[in-house]
Image (cartoon, coloured by chain):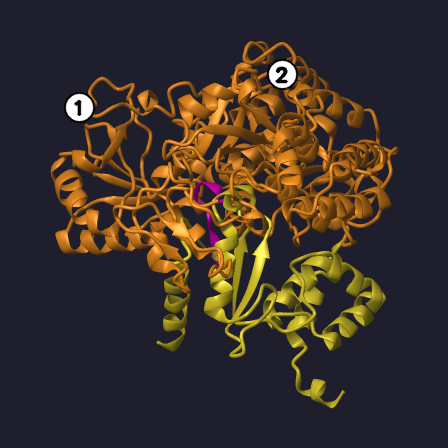
Amino acid sequence: MVSNQSGNLEQKTIPRKPVIIVGTGTCGLGAGARGVLASIEQEIGKLKLQVDVVQTGCIGMCVHEVLVDVVFPGRTRVTYGGVKPAMISQILEEHAGKGEAVKKYVLSQMPSEDKTVAPYEGIPFFDDLEMNRNQLKHILRNCGFINPDSIDEYIAREGYTALRKVLKTMSPTEVVNEISKSGLRGRGGGGFPTGEKWASCARYTADEKFILCNADEGDPGAFMDRSLLEGDPHAVLEGMIIAGYAIKATSGYIYARAEYPLAVRRLKHTIEEAKRKGFLGKNILDSGYSLDIYIKEGAGAFVCGESTALQYSIEGKRGMPRTRPPQSVEAGLWDKPTVLNNVETFANVPVIINKGAEWYAKIGTEKSKGTKIFSLTGKVKNPGLVEVPMGTTIRQIVFDMGGGIPKKKRFKAVQIGGPSGGCLPESLLDSPIDYESLVGAGAMMGSGSFVVVDDATCMVELARFFMNFCASESCGKCPPCRIGTTLMLDILTRITQGLGEEKDLEILEQMSDEIKTMSLCGLGQSAPNPVKSTLRYFKDEYLAHIRDKNCPTATCVALHKYEVTPEKCTKCMACVRNCPVKAISGSTKETAVIDKEKCIKCNLCYEKCNFMAIK
Amino acid sequence: MKTNETIDLSKVEKVLDKYKDARGALIPILQFVQVEYGYLPVYVIDHISERLNISASEIVGVSTFYAQFHLNPRGKHIVKVCCGTACHVKGAKKIAEKLGETLEVSVGMTTKDKLFTLEEVACLGACSLAPVMMVDEDVHGKLAPDTVGAVINEIKGQGNT
């Protein structure tokens, strides 16, 4: 009964029979959506229900996956969170069968514009949920609402109207001007003005020109682009076609990450559907403009997110960046004029065209316009996708939308921008998020990964983690990056092992500056950022490792002293029971004590202690 | 080599035909071979080299640059432990260690029965379910050291039925 075509999610029109909607993005599937779907099919057969079952993408509330929505004719759409196969029979029987929501599993309901659609009493609306209250969903508007495999559902929600408007009423130059006027800046990292990039490419004439989409989302901790490609692929494609028209591209490539098989499958289907409807291919919508778009699957190299490396990879070569100039807009892919934008940037384009540059430029701050999607993860109560206007403060994202830090721990820092970004401490919680403020604070927008760390996370170890990442992903072409990251990693590793010296910190500072100024591409230039920002805000943690041979968070195993902190010990005896050499004494009445003579430093007690009482 | 004569190159031929006129075809062709054979056998590289008129050393250069390509055979199932930031903060290291214990291999190695290869991956983009791992194309989320064994056993079970 699972159909990929039917299903009427528009709350403006009322479905004739109940619709069950299951979130099957990677998050949903990872949380067990497949089992839930199977169980739904089974129960439908058992109960002999007449319902449609539809799949959708990520709605951003990843923490509550698996998400199942039920629309009963004449009632609002209700979302169930944390759905397990065992809950299905009750939900189907009572809600899909009789129209009564099973309140104990309910998360929220969607508001409806239609007055004949009756809301349920006592169920909060989606927008009133803590994590959605201050969000502004323009780019994610369709994610989790439409069936991403259905072009008709995209069209029903203003899909391809922007493309139609552009092709029928605007010249390529007018499109470029509109995007320039909106103030849109690249969402992939550097924040280069999109309109300016398009304009410089439009100046060149050539027999071939290319429009490229960077879907090689490699930042660890980032999944905005994956969610967009899985949840609303047509919006990305539409933006890309408009960009193609603006720079007069002859063909386009989407460079997609190999680790995102579902996104690649959806994209292939999306391109076929768009071609079938005449939005892509020869003579698009009778405008005389033709464009073909192909998918290139990446083969697993982080550096291929860099524009020239990405182009070499499409050409079938090793993805190593080259010196610039010439810039890609002049001589990019196969030495032809090329524009490369990232997934989220393209997804902004239809919104700007539909609503106008002036409307768009009103959102955000003076120099950073529009909204930005962040993938909020790490130690927060509500991890997920958030879309907020530029200028929103870090505090709002962490505490309002993210719900704060779980398990009564304290906020320590937020890591923004992945391996190219930095760690920002509590004192900067109220600083706004825009391109300039982040760079000033020692981080960068990056693609938008937003990892919250609590007081149990060692910042030296975190810096070491990122340096390890950069050292292994360095392509090896230029020595400052290849050798520099490895040397910095060595020093950081030594510090986490208790073998650091005080002069190491000076050397780290100096090497950071050298690698930053001398590296060929963005990977090397930004690789020292996590070290620089942790040195700037968390220097005392480095010093504790070096001077006192102590890891304040007891994360670095080599520095463990295997002592019990009496104030933290709850006398639960978990350590006593698990010690393989019976080196720990204690009881439910007495604090545990570790006999250092007997201890073999196996670390088991540390792992078993739930209260961080062992250092 | 004698053993190679028995190997069927017709599938490679087909994909070479498909990309006959395409530019930048080397990586898609290698990706096909990787999926089809589980690795890039030397004789297939030689064959592609002849047909595309690209030197074998360049092909090996490309294949060693990207994490996706392997020059040695791998297991039937590929277990990729995510070690991205969110997973790292939430204890990916312990997941990797436990998997190594369960499968009796270290990261990068293949089990004796050729069933599993254990690998690390930079980020799977399923950070809200951290820590996660990917077995073939399926993402398994919210793992704990004592639950990974069950996932592996489930896959072993599927293989037998």
Q: Is residue A278 visible?
A: yes
Residue at the spot 64% in from the left edge and 73% down from the top edge: B11
The picture's colour for chain B is yellow
Q: Is residue A291 visible?
A: no
* Crowd class of label 2 (few under 14; some 14 to 19; many from 20; radius 10 Å): many
Residue at the spot 16% in from the left edge and 23% down from the top edge: A121
Residue A368 - label:
2
Q: Tag 1 or tag 2, which sits nearer the N-term?
A: 1
Q: Which residue is mark 1?
A: A122
Question: How far across and how far down the image is residue A89, in percent?
Answer: 17, 49
Question: How far across and how far down the image is residue A451, in percent?
Answer: 52, 34
Please tell me which residue lies in front, B118 or A338: B118
Q: Amino acid at mark 2?
A: Ser
Look at the image and give the residue range highlighted in magenta. Answer: B126-138
Residue A366 - label:
none
Task: Identify the chain of the residue marked 2, using the numbered disc in the image.
Answer: A
Image: A454 above or below B52: above
Is B137 inside the magenta-drawn segment?
yes
Question: How far across and how far down the image is residue A460, in percent?
Answer: 62, 39
Please tell me which residue lies in front, B110 or A428: A428
The chain displayed orange equals: A
Task: Identify the chain of the residue marked 1, using the numbered disc in the image.
Answer: A
- Asked if labels 2 and 1 share a chain, the reply is yes
